[in-house]
Image (cartoon, rainbow, N blue to C red):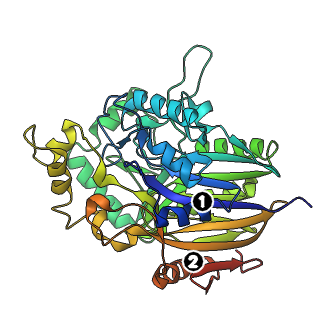
């Protein structure tokens, strides 16, 4: 028997401020994280000093932080970082390359982006005293051209993120499908795609799929929507897991996914559930999700944890120091306005958006123990990020005594058959428990 290994993971770290002091809240969170051997974060910002041009598209705001924020992450205790998400290319390839350079400079094991698909998708390894741990990071939320490209003997690969694409199909009754076809015949919504298919620049979607613009429709006996992992990405990531499990004692998957089922952000999209279980079937020991900026349920599958979303760990979008002209123009502003004007316009003076939803500012830090590849127990420590503070001071984590955070997570986890007990302000999932 090998010694038990402790893991800690957190959700999104959209960190834009440097913390020059270490108050009690910092000390308590840092001490908690340092209990674990493996400490994982998702870095949801680019890190550089204007070393990349702003992209024409961003993950929402254009995220750029001074390199010194990585020292803060280091002092919290993180030693593994995933950085495949919808902000990785906010500042194009220059921002990506600079972020990678600073992550290396600060000594992090990091995964999820790189100079080509092989680098972006590669497992990265942390050497612990009692085990070797692999991290594979991917994202399903990104602009299409952000996906890293494969190398070829005759052509260089493309820098970018490790993609986990998905296919969305809308199933409708015959009557509704015929109505869509009549609409398409009366306007030009499919004109360009028809030409592209005819000229060989686009593949036909198949006889049973009708394209309405960029959306896929299929005839069915009722109306519903499905999502499924893109088979090429799923197969590639599974192959990477199978490689990593031969070279490490543990394999952890980090997946950034904003996608939801219907309009319920707390319910992960179907493809994400399929993806997570496929990863564990292939040999992964845990799947750590983030992206929607709130908590989602926890599933124990084959004695391995799936955290569908851990919410936010650090969230400081209101402290960005600059935004490109595109951001201003979107809200009818110009060069006479400043970044505070732009952020207030986006949030309608902080009456809408993520800043007004308390659940965005509440999360958990799981600490779980594994031995010889088997899950022994999970502790869930609630945190809050300063919802009551002025917006420019919100976003730092502190341990919370609010019982409703764990009670909400308890409710979210029940549909997955997961039973959580709450003892002394800490959530506990004991193994064995009900598993699907």
Which residue is painted at 50% across and 29% down in the image? 159
> Compared to 256, does 110 lie above or below?
above
> From this viewpoint, is residue 325 visible?
yes
Q: Is residue 207 left or right of residue 31?
A: left
Among all residues in the image, which is located at the extreme top?
154
Classify mark 1: helix, strand or loop. strand
Distance between the Cα atoms at labels 2 and 1? 17 Å
Q: Is residue 187 left or right of residue 310?
A: left
* Residue 107 x/y as whole percent: 61, 37
The residue under label 2 is 413
Q: Front-most of 360 and 177? A: 360
Which residue is painted at 24% across and 41% down in the image? 323
Q: Quadrant of residue 285?
A: bottom right
> Compared to 401, does 293 lie above or below?
above
Q: Residues within 10 Å of mark 1 (few under 14, many from 20)?
A: many
Mark 2 touching mark 1, by CB under 8 A? no
Quadrant occupied by the C terminus: bottom right
Q: Front-most of 204 and 38? A: 38
Q: Is residue 136 left or right of residue 271?
A: right
Q: Is residue 186 left or right of residue 358?
A: left
* Residue 403 x/y as whole percent: 49, 84
The residue under label 1 is 9
Which disc is residue 153 wearing? none
> From this viewpoint, is residue 229 visible?
no
Question: Can you tell which of label 2 and label 1 is closer to the viewer?
Answer: 1
* Residue 80 x/y as whole percent: 62, 47
């Amino acid at each position: 028997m090998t010694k038990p290994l402790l893991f800690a993971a957190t959700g999104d770290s959209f960190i834009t401020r440097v913390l020059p002091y270490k108050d009690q809240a910092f000390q308590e969170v840092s001490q908690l994280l340092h209990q674990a051997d493996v400490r994982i974060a998702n870095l949801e910002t680019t890190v550089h000093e204007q070393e990349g041009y702003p992209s024409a598209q961003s993950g929402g705001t254009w995220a750029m932080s001074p390199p010194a924020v990585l020292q803060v992450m280091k002092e919290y205790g993180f030693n593994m970082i995933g950085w495949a998400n919808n902000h990785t290319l906010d500042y194009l390839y220059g921002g990506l390359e600079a972020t990678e350079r600073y992550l290396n400079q600060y000594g992090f094991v990091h995964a999820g982006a790189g100079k080509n698909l092989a680098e972006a998708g590669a497992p990265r390894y942390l050497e612990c005293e009692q085990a070797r741990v692999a991290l594979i990071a991917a994202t399903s939320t990104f602009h299409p051209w952000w996906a890293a490209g494969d190398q070829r003997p005759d052509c260089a690969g493309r820098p970018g993120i490790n993609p986990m694409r998905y296919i969305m199909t809308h199933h409708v009754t015959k009557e509704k499908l015929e109505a869509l076809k009549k609409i398409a015949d009366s306007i030009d919504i499919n004109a360009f795609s028809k030409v592209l298919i005819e000229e060989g620049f686009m593949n036909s979607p198949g006889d049973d799929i009708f394209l309405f613009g960029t959306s896929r429709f299929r005839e069915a006996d009722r109306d519903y929507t499905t999502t499924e992992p893109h088979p090429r990405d799923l197969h590639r990531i599974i192959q990477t897991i199978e490689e990593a499990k031969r070279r490490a004692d543990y394999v952890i998957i980090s997946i950034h996914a904003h996608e939801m089922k219907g309009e319920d952000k707390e319910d992960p999209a179907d493809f994400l559930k399929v993806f997570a279980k496929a990863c564990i079937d292939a040999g992964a020991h845990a799947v750590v999700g983030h992206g929607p900026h709130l908590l989602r349920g926890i599933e124990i599958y084959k004695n391995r944890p799936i955290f569908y979303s851990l919410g936010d760990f650090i969230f400081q979008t209101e402290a960005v120091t600059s935004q490109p002209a595109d951001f201003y123009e979107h809200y009818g502003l110009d060069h006479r306005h400043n970044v505070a004007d732009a952020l207030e316009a986006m949030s309608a003076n902080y009456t809408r958006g993520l800043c007004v939803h308390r659940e965005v500012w509440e999360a958990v830090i799981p600490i779980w123990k594994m031995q010889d590849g088997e899950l022994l127990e999970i502790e869930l420590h609630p945190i809050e990020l300063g919802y009551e503070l002025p917006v420019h001071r919100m976003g730092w984590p502190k341990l919370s005594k609010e019982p409703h955070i764990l009670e909400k997570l308890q409710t979210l986890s029940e549909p997955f058959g997961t039973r959580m007990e709450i003892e002394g302000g800490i959530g506990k999932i004991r193994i064995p428990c009900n598993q699907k």
